[in-house]
Structures are given as structure tokens and as C-alpha cells.
Image (cartoon, rainbow, N blue to C red):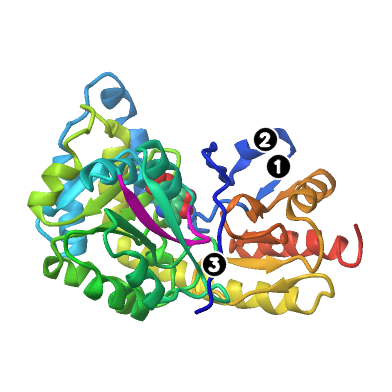
Amino acid sequence: MREKVIISKGMRTCSHGGIYSVNPRLVRLDCSSSINPLGTPRKAISAIKMNANSLAQKYPDPECRELKKSLSRYLGIDPEWISVGNGAIEVIYWFVCAAFVKGRVVIPAPTFCEYELASQKAGAEVTFVPLHNLELEAGQVIEKARGADAVFLCNPNNPTGILATKQIMKIIENVDSSTRILLDECFIELADNPDANTMIEQISEFDNLVILRSLTKSFGLAGLRVGYGVCNPTLAKKLSANKIPWNVNGLAQVAGVAALLERRRYLSKARALVKKERKFLHDSIGKLQSFRPLRSNSNYFLVHLQGRNSTQFRDKLLKKTGVLVRDCSTFTGMGTQYIRLAVKMHTENILLLKALEAFDHND
Ligand SMILES: Cc1ncc(COP(=O)(O)O)c(C=O)c1O
């Protein structure tokens, strides 16, 4: 059997994109964070402005009742199945406690680094299952999951942007019910055909499954921080057992409710834009000599740098052009030659393209 060992970069501060990953004053265009290119929905901005004065001085609803009701309507799921966190990140850390992660967890690699970090902080050993040609291998994950406390899955995966729905369903159906599964769908609303790829409708069939979602990326609320987990009410109680009171601030709650009022029009417009602009970027970058763009189903994609080092490349590109890309060398198992690009509005994508062109055949 093909076996490749992946070395964790040890207990480390998990590295992310975003303007604070570098000197923020250098950034003219941030293509490192994969946020909805349309920006925050207009109704959410109005709600923030309208409520700023009254909500700034009030304690927020610690149970996020109105927001849960809106999410419940959106997902077609009872509110008791929904646990709202200060971003999806908070729910990942709750999951680690709720899944009694102490022994061993299974994580495909490369993927979002916080699963690894949260598990290591809880004292767990991490078994990485390398992707094969950046694709998820269900059989390997199922085999390694025997006796594990938890498995982490991400659909579409970050940083690849690839949907692996069939493989993920196979894993969820075959992993023992004593092993808890976190399925991260934080980018699914910006990926191709989310209805056919989400597991939300099947959530009631699996007592060990938590589906992770977020409004930070799909609704452009990264600064306000709203994420949520969906799972059966018994597990939901365990999931949020360590929740601090007032974990989601009042403005984030009203912005979330308002954003969800616009969901249909806003998300379908965003997906159509992402699909068109991803193809534009992919085709244009593919014509350059020193960059190889990789297939993706989402609002971001990987680019191979054909021999160049991704950290050095990010820094030089930023210094010369003000364009920030995600250096992927900090993803466990990714190597040092990939960057990740967020798909943005057409004018921004042209700026990104011009910046890359300036570095074609050029160090
Ligand atoms: C796959 C994935 N899941 C979860 C998160 C955390 O999302 P949030 O901003 O809602 O905390 C991120 C953030 O980059 C992510 O990439």
C-alpha cells in the first residue's frame, strides 16, 4: 500500500492569510482571504448602522435566539440543532472538547490547520491521511479512523477548493458511530452546486456528526465573527457546554439576521460571479509560463509556482505590487511551492493578474 508520512510542523501558532499575516500597510489588494467577493450584504450593513447605538451598550442575547430562528428557516432545521459560535473557529474548539479528543484524531492533509492545532492543544495525537494528487482517499481515512476519537473533514477543502462529496459520504457512513466527525462546510455556499454537496439534509441520520458552517465567508462577516455547528440536540448540548456567556456580540447577531434575509439573491449572484471569474483567472493564469493553476470548485484555488518558494514569492509580490496571496507552505503536507488565490470582483482579478504577469519568468 502506498504510504506517505506527513510530519506535523509541531505545536505551532496556526498560520492564516489576511492582511495581519504581513505588514497590513503594504496590502492594496488582499487575495489571501477567501471571502464572498460581493462584500457584506447591504441589509446587514444597514442593520449594523441602525442598531449601533442601542446594541453597543446592551448585553447581547447569550442564546442568539433570533439568529438561530433565521438560521433555522435558512437550513430547514429546528433551532435546537444549531449552536452559534464566535466564528466557526469557536465551534472547532468546542468540538474537540465535546468529542473527548484526548487519544487520537484523523485529519486528511493538507487542510485547514486549526483542526490539528485544537487537537494538539487538547493533548491528542494526530494521524494525517495525505491527499492523493490533492484528492481525498476515503478508504484510507476509514481505515485510520478505527479507534480514533474524531475525524475532521472539509468540503470543499481548504486550501484545494475541491469538493469530495462522494468520498465524504462514504467516510461518514463507514466510520464507527463512537468516533465523532466534524464536517466543515464553511465554504460550501460559495462552491458549485451547494444543494447537491451539503450533508445538512442527512444530519439526522448520523448521531456522531457535527456540520460546521459560517457566515464569515459566505456573507462577508469575517470581522463580526458568526459561525455555527449543526448536530442533534443531545450532541449540541455537549458541543456548547464550554461556551462562554455572550460569546456572539449583538451587532454580529443583528447583522447575521439581516444578511440571511437577502440569502437567495445574494448567494446565487455570488456563486455565478465566482464561477465566471474563477474560469477567467484560471484560463489567464494558465497562459503564463511560471504558474500552474489547479482545478477548484470554490471561490479560491491553488497555483503551483514551478520551482519558486511560496513564502519568498508572496513577500516579493506584495512588496512590488501590493497584492497579497496566501502562502500555502504553512499547511501541513503542502510543500513550499503553492499559493492560494481568492476569486474576487473582475476589476480586482485584473489587478491580481497584472501583478502575476509582472512576475512571469521573473524572480
Ligand atoms: C475551512 C475553514 N473552516 C473554518 C474557518 C474559520 O471560520 P470563521 O471565520 O467562521 O471562524 C476557516 C477560516 O479560514 C476555514 O478556512
Q: Is residue 264 left or right of residue 42?
A: left
- Count neighbours of disc 3 (C-alpha within 10 A) and say few if under 14, some if 14 to 19, many if 20 or more: many
Q: Quadrant of the C terminus?
A: bottom right
Q: Which residue is mark 1?
A: 27
- Mark 2 touches mark 3? (CB < 8 Å): no
Q: How many marks?
A: 3
Q: Which secondary structure, mark 2? A: helix
Q: Nearer the viewer, residue 139 or 259?
A: 139
Alpha-carbon distance for marks 2 and 1? 6 Å
What is the quadrant of residue 62 in the picture? top left
Residue type highlighted by circle 2? Pro
Q: Which residue is mark 3?
A: 160
Q: Is residue 26 left or right of residue 167?
A: right
Magenta region? 103-112
Q: Magenta stretch: dominant SS?
A: strand
- Mark 2 touches mark 1? (CB < 8 Å): yes
| 164 lies above or below 126 | below
Residue 195 drawn at (x, y percent): 30, 75
Q: Is residue 220 left or right of residue 309?
A: left
- Mark 1 touches mark 3? (CB < 8 Å): no
Q: Which residue is mark 2?
A: 24
Residue type highlighted by circle 1? Val
Dot 1 or dot 3, earlier in sequence:
1
Residue type highlighted by circle 3? Thr
Residue drawn 13% across and 50% down?
235
Q: Which secondary structure, mark 3? A: loop
Q: Nearer the viewer, residue 4 or 89?
A: 4
| 69 lies above or below 357 | above
Residue 254 drawn at (x, y percent): 27, 40
